[in-house]
Image (cartoon, rainbow, N blue to C red):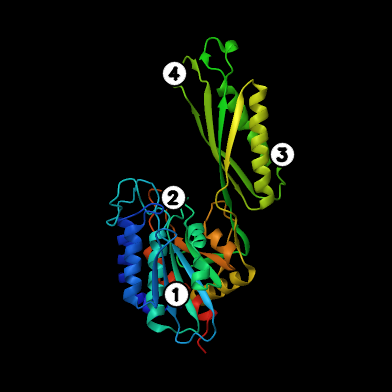
Amino acid sequence: MPIKNRFSEMLPEITAWRQDFHAHPELLFDCHRTAGIVAEKLREFGCDDVVEGIGRTGVVGVIHGKKTASGRVVGLRADMDALPIHEATGVAHASKEAGKMHACGHDGHTAMLLGAAKYLAETRNFDGTVVVIFQPAEEGGGGGDEMCRDGMMEQFGIQEVYGMHNWPGTPAGEFAIRPGAFFAATDQFEIAVEGRGGHAAKPHQCVDTTVAAAHLVVAMQSIVSRNADPTMEIVVSVTSFVTESQAFNVIPQHVTLRGTVRTLSQEMRDLAEVRIKALAEHTAAAFGAKAHVDYRRGYPVMVNSETETEHAAAAARAVSGQCASAPLVMGGEDFAYMLQERPGAYILVGNGDTADVHNPAYDFNDSVIPAGCSFWVELAEQRMPAA
């Protein structure tokens, strides 16, 4: 594997950064410690400009090549935030923050982009400008959207942008990508069902919200099986069924259902919202109850640009000798917002045989660091060749 030798030499240093981030996880926009360390290191590396506070706690570093005559500006993005999970890895660098852990590898993403930034600032073997982007609040906060709303693309003149995520179950250091729709849109719904509560021994005097809500859970499965085109990807999951009573002899007056919808097209996204609202209203009415739907649209579909996908694949092949076709992913990714602003691509790098992301036993595989750093550098140098 043609990893750049410099990253093999830097591996202990970058690993130390990664494990420090892992031991001190921060949630959503509360990435002050992580962002402070990132900004400090970027200045130490000699970046030409370092700007903090974009998207609340985001950090951007600018690195000019030996030449800038091409006028090309390429953005490279990593996420910094952790998850509200109790860690169960047992590793020496385990989280020191109760109920918080880096269960998705953002600590590794941040460390790898920092390693690449150090190398690029040392060598500057490219004609153009690299903009390294360190983003907060990927895990549900929409930090990518906030950085874009703060004018990041325009402020730094970014013309194309790339992201990377580790992928458990894929051999360590191997890459995978696909053009077009890649990660799903992530919408949420909350359905409040209201009836008439009363004694469980007198159901005829009540409007039973539990029965109405149970039928609604079943009815919503028909959205995928009977309303959606079978060739289109869609997931509708009810993940929470909450009543206001825990008593054995009380029929509750209110029941709340919560869940998520995952789609890979605007057509299916619109269909799901319309059908959930219609099913909720009419199913509840059939039992004499009422239903109110709060449908919240989350991250959009993440769509890789065709040309930039091939650029990323070429860099991956230069590093590892291969780049596989990635599967469609029904999980969400707020890098989608950056790809709505500029052409670009998102690539997966194998994390090896580890626990899956969002699992209490997950830990980023530090052996992946040289491949990830090399990919970033290779991509920058291929997109902006010095000669």
Please report whichever mark, 2 or 1, sits nearer to the chain's N-terminal start.
2
Q: Count neighbours of disc 4 (C-alpha within 10 A) and say few if under 14, some if 14 to 19, many if 20 or more.
A: few
Residue 57 visible? The answer is yes
Q: Position of residue 183 (x, y in %)?
A: 57, 56
Asked which secondary structure carries label 3, the reply is helix
Label 2: which residue?
A: 358
Q: Which mark is residue 247?
A: 4
Real-space Cα separation, disc 2 to disc 4, in angstroms: 34 Å
Label 3: which residue?
A: 226
Q: Position of residue 264 (x, y in %)?
A: 63, 53
Real-space Cα separation, disc 3 to disc 4, in angstroms: 37 Å
Q: Position of residue 14 (x, y in %)?
A: 34, 69
Residue 11 visible? The answer is no
Real-space Cα separation, disc 2 to disc 1, in angstroms: 26 Å
Please report whichever mark, 2 or 4, sits nearer to the chain's N-terminal start.
4
Is 325 situated above or below 248?
below
Q: Tag 1: residue type?
A: Ser
Please report whichever mark, 3 or 1, sits nearer to the chain's N-terminal start.
3
Asked which secondary structure carries label 2, the reply is loop
Label 1: which residue?
A: 374
Please report whichever mark, 2 or 3, sits nearer to the chain's N-terminal start.
3
Q: Tag 2: residue type?
A: His
Q: Quadrant of residue 159?
A: bottom right
Real-space Cα separation, disc 2 to disc 3, in angstroms: 31 Å
Choose mark 3 or mark 4, whichever is in front: 4
The residue sitting at the bottom extreme is: 387
Q: Which mark is residue 257?
A: none
Residue 293 or residue 183, whichever sits in front? 293
Please report whichever mark, 1 or 4, sits nearer to the chain's N-terminal start.
4
